[in-house]
Image (cartoon, rainbow, N blue to C red):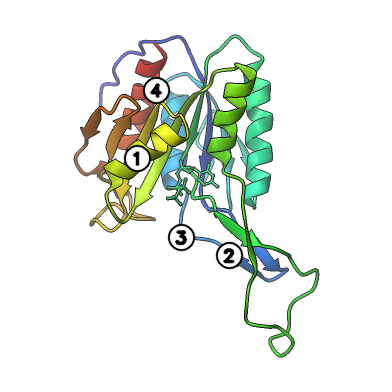
Amino acid sequence: MRTPRRSTAPLAFVVTAGPTREFIDPVRFLSNPSTGRMGFEVARAAASRGHRVALVAGPVSLKTPKGVARVDVVSARDMLAAVLSRLDDLGRGPVRVVFVATAAVADWRPAECAAVKLKKGAMRPVLKLVRNPDILKTVAERRAAEGAAPLLVGFAAETGDPVAEALRKCREKNLAMVVANDVTEPGAGFGTPTNRAALVRRDGSVRRLPLMSKAALARRIVRECEDLCS
Ligand code: CTP
């Protein structure tokens, strides 16, 4: 397949992928079914177009794409720390930075993680949860505070109206673009090799894409990022 020529200078991508795990005790955690596939495909597509890529991955069983610098994390707080450190490193260079948040970050974590395995007889079957940091929002706010300007791209995996939700997230988190999809549609959920998405920009423009492989969608997203940076 012919790849369209790149319209920009090389960019530096930081991509999050996969789920996070929020431990209750050493043998139990809260998580979700994300396989990390979409984020790994974005990282692969960006590297194959000559961009520098840092991939911050939650616990997944996927091989690192060629040319990608990967860091493995477990919890949302680990992921946030790794993302900020990669953005700081890359932001010092002359190259425009793009942050693509594909990870299905757990919004909540147990208020406490027990140091030893909780015994069912001794455990009250009630979990107290606290909010995790919103990685994308934190990056957006830091950008506003510090004047550094990575291009921000989010994902919205929804069960309701993905485009309306994407537009809300775009504006709330000050993103350039949100990739929206309805995870209840055939071929578009967690772990599938395909996705049907809409690309929603902050100006309200919406491009609805047909069902396609996650690899093809990733190439499309990378080209949109190049376009937004040009
Ligand atoms: N995200 C993130 N950190 C979080 C939660 C979400 O970086 N703690 C990012 C996701 O990677 C995604 C975007 O924010 O790119 C939207 O995530 P989503 O879970 O769809 O929505 P939320 O922002 O959590 O909002 P809501 O729960 O209202 O749907």
Q: Amino acid at mark 2?
A: Leu
- Name the foreground residue: 152 vs 98: 152
- Name the foreground residue: 41 vs 81: 81
Marked residue nearer the N-terminal end (1 or 3):
3
Image spot of residue 187 (x, y percent): 26, 54
Q: Are marks 1 and 2 in contact (CB under 8 Å)?
A: no
Q: Amino acid at mark 4?
A: Cys
Q: Nearer the viewer, mark 2 or mark 3?
A: 2
For residue 138, above or below residue 186:
above
Q: Which mark is residue 166?
A: 1
Query: Would the CB of label 1 be found within 8 Å of ligand 1?
Result: no
Marked residue nearer the N-terminal end (4 or 1):
1
For residue 44, above or below residue 163:
above
Total number of numbered labels? 4
Image spot of residue 213 (x, y percent): 28, 42
10 Å neighbourhood of mark 3: few (<14), some, or many (≥20)? few
Which of the image's four quarters has the C terminus?
top left
Per the image, label 4 sits on a secondary structure element best described as helix
The residues tagged by marks 4 and 3 sit, at their Cα atoms, a distance apart of: 27 Å
For residue 149, above or below residue 85:
above
Label 4 belongs to which residue? 225
Q: Amino acid at mark 3?
A: Pro
The residues tagged by marks 1 and 2 sit, at their Cα atoms, a distance apart of: 25 Å
Q: Amino acid at mark 1?
A: Ala
Q: Which residue sits at x=34%, y=22%? A: 223
Residue 214 is at least partly visible in this image: no
Label 2 belongs to which residue? 30
10 Å neighbourhood of mark 1: few (<14), some, or many (≥20)? many
